């Protein structure tokens, strides 16, 4: 028994915590309880108390716990049918517990594996309500930071709900080593700015990118190429390895729907939709999709002469690279250097064992 909740079973277990199914004895209802327990930072002792693994990690553990508590209190204020409802947040056992509604159904990841999202209409039935919920969250100054198929739950009545906000994970990553940041983003779904420890560059456009990646997975069976991989093409002024949805999406999807997904997956945040409801209208065909540079799809530019095609391509790449902020180029270089150093250390350490 924990604060009037009878724990029944474990329904989720990740690197950041554990989610339980429980019975609320006060209100006689089933709930889900999420416990803050980052496995890289803490462990549970024989008395069920959660403790940091080392004294050095205590500050990081406490900071993440404070953010988790703050996140829970913020979510308690949200009242939207497509955002998970938080009933209560409390502290015990040197950790924090978030009590949420328990919903029957399946997450979008499981439903994708069963091939249930095979047409545009079935996806719109998910993304339109979720976009409305996201807009509600964004208006409150909150960013989800971890949208992916596993965090979109579809109830048995067909209504979708957004789960598992990632701001506390982001807090831990921001104050921890670079490896922590990399391990707490979801490759293919996280935009490049989430690899950066400056939260000011993150906003609604970051969630829109992740949601666009979720729809891309539904279309193609695979997530888009990771933003960190894409960053190298911008640094080296080479072709973006991202394959547009307009090229790989099936014929059962309209061009404007596919272009709206490509718009969400623009590498630079300023080129993406800035508002979830605006993007929803583009997906539905209610508003035109911009040409990612500010003009609409109705604008048709004359095709270049045959001899100028190759030269035009070089000019476009050069202009694109010139627009990249200096901080972004430095960050890409540092991440690349860290990756090479890590590979070198691995080869040195394990190559010598053979």
Image: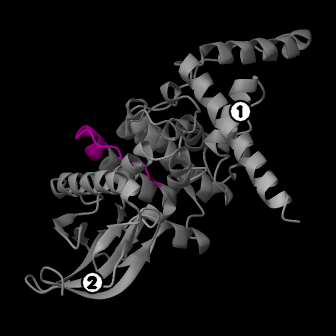
Lower position in the chain sequence, tag 1 or tag 2? 2
Q: Residue at x 36, y 52 (%)?
A: 60
Left or right, 26 with reference to 147: left
Q: Residue at x 53, y 67 (%)?
A: 109
Query: Residue 328 magenta-drawn?
Result: no
Residue with the mark numbered 1 = 232
Left or right, 151 with reference to 190: left
Looking at the rendered image, the quarter that the N terminus falls into is: bottom left
Mark 1 → mark 2, Cα distance in angstroms? 48 Å
Left or right, 139 with reference to 150: left
Residue 23, visible in the rendered structure? yes
Instruction: Give the percent coordinates (x, y) of residue 34.
Output: 30, 70
The single residue placed furthest to the right in the displayed view is 307
**Magenta-drawn stretch, dominant element (helix, strand or loop):** loop
Q: Give the SS element for disc 1.
A: helix
Residue with the mark numbered 2 = 47
Span highlighted in magenta in the image:
135-147
Q: Residue at x 62, y 23 (%)?
A: 329
Q: Residues within 10 Å of mark 1 (few under 14, many from 20)?
A: some
Q: How many numbered circles does the render carry?
A: 2
Residue 333 is drawn in which quadrant?
Answer: top right
Q: Residues within 10 Å of mark 2 (few under 14, many from 20)?
A: few
Q: Nearer the viewer, mark 1 or mark 2?
A: 2
Instruction: Give the percent coordinates (x, y) of residue 104.
Output: 34, 79
* Nearer to me, 243 or 336: 336
Residue 114 is drawn in which quadrant?
Answer: bottom right
Residue 263 is drawn in which quadrant?
Answer: top right
* Nearer to me, 303 or 224: 224
* Nearer to me, 9 or 155: 9
Q: Give the SS element for disc 2.
A: loop
Looking at the rendered image, the quarter that the C terminus falls into is: bottom right
């Amino acid at each position: 028994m924990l604060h009037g909740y009878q724990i029944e079973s474990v329904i989720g277990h990740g690197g950041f915590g554990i989610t339980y199914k429980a019975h609320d004895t006060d209100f006689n209802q089933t709930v889900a309880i999420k416990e803050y327990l980052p496995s890289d930072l803490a462990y549970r002792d024989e008395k069920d108390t959660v403790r940091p693994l080392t004294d050095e990690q205590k500050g990081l553990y406490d900071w993440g716990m404070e953010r988790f508590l703050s996140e829970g209190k913020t979510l308690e204020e949200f009242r939207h049918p497509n955002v998970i409802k938080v009933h209560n947040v409390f502290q015990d056992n040197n950790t924090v517990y978030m009590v949420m509604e328990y919903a029957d159904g399946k997450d979008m990841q499981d439903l994708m594996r069963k091939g249930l999202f095979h047409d545009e209409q079935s996806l719109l039935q998910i993304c339109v309500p979720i976009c409305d919920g996201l807009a509600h969250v964004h208006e409150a100054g909150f960013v989800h930071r971890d949208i992916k198929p596993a965090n979109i739950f579809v109830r048995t009545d067909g209504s979708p709900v957004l789960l598992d906000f990632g701001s506390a994970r982001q807090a831990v990553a921001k104050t921890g080593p670079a490896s922590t940041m990399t391990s707490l983003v979801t490759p293919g779904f996280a935009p490049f700015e989430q690899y950066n420890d400056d939260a000011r560059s993150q906003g609604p456009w970051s969630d829109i990118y992740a949601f666009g990646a979720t729809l891309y997975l539904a279309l193609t069976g695979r997530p888009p190429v990771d933003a960190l991989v894409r960053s190298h093409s911008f640094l080296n002024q080479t072709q973006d390895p991202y394959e547009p949805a307009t090229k790989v999406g099936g014929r059962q999807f309209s061009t404007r729907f596919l272009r709206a997904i490509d718009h969400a997956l623009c590498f630079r945040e300023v080129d993406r939709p800035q508002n979830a409801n605006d993007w929803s209208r583009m997906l539905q065909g209610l508003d035109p999709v911009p040409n990612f540079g500010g003009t609409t799809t109705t604008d048709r530019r004359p095709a270049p002469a045959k001899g100028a095609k190759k030269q035009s391509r070089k000019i476009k790449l050069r202009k694109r690279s010139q627009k990249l902020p200096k901080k972004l180029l430095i960050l890409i270089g540092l991440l690349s250097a860290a990756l090479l150093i890590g590979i070198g250390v691995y080869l040195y350490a394990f190559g010598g064992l053979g």
